[in-house]
Amino acid sequence: MPPHDPATRALFYAASTHWLRQGYARTLAVDRAVPLPVAQTLLGHASVQTTAAYARTDLAQLREFVEGSFPASN
């Protein structure tokens, strides 16, 4: 970490293991399309709703899914 970059240093010190858990949850549920009950078990969540909270996608991902699922007919 560069000593002359206070913003990066502040972000590093604010990091937590919870960020890693969130990243893992998102990778499972969104990037790898692991079924929510499976991700729930891997993450140790008591409720699938907790796991579903990490499965939110952004607009670009939604658009990609819709366009891939319903190709334009010519």
Image (cartoon, rainbow, N blue to C red):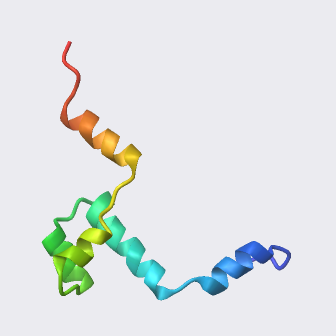
- Snapshot quadrant of residue 49: bottom left
The quadrant the C terminus occupies is: top left
Residue 20: percent from left, percent from top: 44, 79
Residue 24: percent from left, percent from top: 36, 74
Q: Which residue is at a point 75% across and 73% down the rendered structure image? A: 7
Determine whether 40 is above or below 26 in the image: below
Q: Residue furthest right?
A: 4
Q: Which residue is at a point 44% across and 84% down the rendered structure image? A: 18
- Snapshot quadrant of residue 14: bottom right
Q: Which of 33 and 56 is in front in this view?
A: 56
- Judged left or right of residue 63, residue 10 is right
Determine whether 62 is above or below 41 in the image: above
Q: Which of 74 and 56 is in front in this view?
A: 56
- Judged left or right of residue 11, residue 38 is left
Residue 47: percent from left, percent from top: 18, 82
- Judged left or right of residue 19, residue 9 is right
Number of numbered discs visible in the structure rendering? 0
The quadrant the N terminus occupies is: bottom right
Q: Which residue is at a point 35% across and 47% down the rendered structure image? A: 61
Q: Residue furthest top?
A: 74
Q: Which residue is at a point 30% across and 70% down the rendered structure image? A: 53
